[in-house]
Amino acid sequence: MEILRRTRELPFASGPVSDEEIGEAGKRLFAFLDQEDNALTR
């Protein structure tokens, strides 16, 4: 959700996204999804 929230708030084209930004967002997203999966399987 944080990723969507951040992209919506930009009133201009932000240009290319760096690999670091993608990597951090990806790590957070997968950690969040893992938590969801773990919560559902308990």
Image (cartoon, helix red, strand yellow):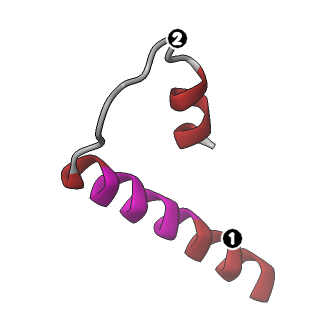
Relative height, residue 16 to residue 15 (above, below) = below
Q: Is residue 20 visible?
A: yes
Residue 6 percent coordinates (x, y): 51, 28
Residue contact at pointers 2 and 1, CB within 8 angstroms: no
Q: Residues within 10 Å of mark 2 (few under 14, many from 20)?
A: few
Q: Does 16 appear in magenta?
A: no
The span picked out in magenta is: 22-32
Q: Helix or strand or loop: what does disc 2 sit on?
A: loop
Of the residues under marks 2 and 1, which one precedes in the sequence?
2
Q: Residue at x 77, y 88 (%)?
A: 41
Q: Main secondary structure of the magenta part?
A: helix
Q: Residues within 10 Å of mark 1 (few under 14, many from 20)?
A: few
Residue 13 percent coordinates (x, y): 42, 22
Q: Residue at x 49, y 69 (%)?
A: 30
Q: Is residue 42 visible?
A: no
| Mark 1: amino acid | Glu
User: For mark 2, what is the residue?
Assistant: 11
Out of 15 and 10, give the one closest to the viewer: 15
Which residue is most to the top?
11
User: For mark 1, what is the residue?
Assistant: 36
Between the C-alphas of marks 2 and 1, the distance is 32 Å
Relative height, residue 6 to residue 18 (above, below) = above
Relative height, residue 10 to residue 7 (above, below) = above
Residue 7 percent coordinates (x, y): 53, 30
**Is 30 left or right of 24, judged from the image as shown?**
right
Instruction: Determine the image quadrant of residue 22.
Output: bottom left
The number of callouts visible is: 2
Relative height, residue 9 to residue 37 (above, below) = above
**Is 26 left or right of 5, judged from the image as shown?**
left
Which mark identifies residue 20? none
**Is 16 left or right of 33, judged from the image as shown?**
left
